[in-house]
Amino acid sequence: MTLHRLAAQGYATAGDAYEKGRPGYPRIAIELLRDTLRIDASSTVIDLGAGTGKLTRLLVPTGARLIALEPVEGMRRKLMQMVPSATVVDGVAEAIPMADATVDAAVAAQAFHWFHGDLALAEIHRVLRPTGRLALLWNLRDERVDWVARLSQIFDRYGRDAPVHRIGAWRRSFTETRLFAPLGEREFTHMQELDMDGLLERAASISYIAALSVQERYSVLSEVRELATTHPDLAGKSTFSFPYRTVVASYERR
């Protein structure tokens, strides 16, 4: 199973930008995930498409055995630096290199929309124990805020071929499967404080922006800088409060 072209190409060199520019997750969302998935020190948890470990590291305090599955070498290198206690594995959600019924909980943060949903759900179902559960998380740019909506307009000119959460195609896999039943979906507000360099890293961490030519990427980052220096809500500020909607969707194995 091969990765989507934009994920493979873009994330190959975006590890540092992803680590510097992407937010973590609010404490309340992690507490919900921990309680819903019943994660404790006796659990084995697999983080699918773990990236640089933005979610993985937040599960370390549970004491669980953490397995971080990440197919992009550049992201794995950064992940091993950031979460040395996790077992980092090369692989994709559609072909998880683990034995049947060996995992208590599975999570995927900023990742499931990249998966071939039907294949990934079959594999997740296979590696989960009969009482296992799955949670998906996303930090979604809060486009109800004008400057964030304008930022998305800049990005959207380049991301037409990329699978994104808001298209909702990922949901089809869950409406059509008999392998998982929904437990619920919650949304929380989240804020990330960034300086100008951090805001530019946030833009550069997007797969389809990272995959652009050097000249095109420079053009995008120049637009982001101009927005940050001219928009009335941002102009003159040295730091920016980037608002997100954090979504947590949970499922139980049937």
Image (cartoon, grey):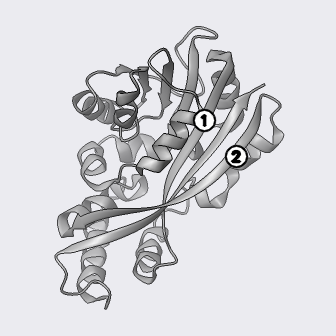
Dot 2 alpha-carbon crowd within 10 angstroms: few under 14, some 14 to 19, many 20 or more = few
Where in the figure is residue 99, as x and y percent of width and height? 58, 8
User: Image height check: is 104 above or below 202?
Assistant: above
Q: Quadrant of residue 226?
A: bottom left
Q: Residue at x 47, y 71 (%)?
A: 157
The image's mark for residue 189 is none
Query: Does residue 208 appear anywhere in the picture?
Result: yes
**For mark 2, what is the residue?**
184
Labelled pair 2, 1 in contact (Cβ < 8 Å) = yes
Dot 1 alpha-carbon crowd within 10 angstroms: few under 14, some 14 to 19, many 20 or more = some
Q: Amino acid at mark 1?
A: Thr
**For mark 1, what is the residue?**
36
The secondary structure type at the circle numbered 1 is helix
Q: Quadrant of the N terminus?
A: top right
State the separation of the CA atoms marked 2 and 1.
Answer: 10 Å
Q: Amino acid at mark 2?
A: Gly
Where in the figure is residue 246, as x and y percent of width and height? 50, 56
User: Image height check: is 40 above or below 225?
Assistant: above
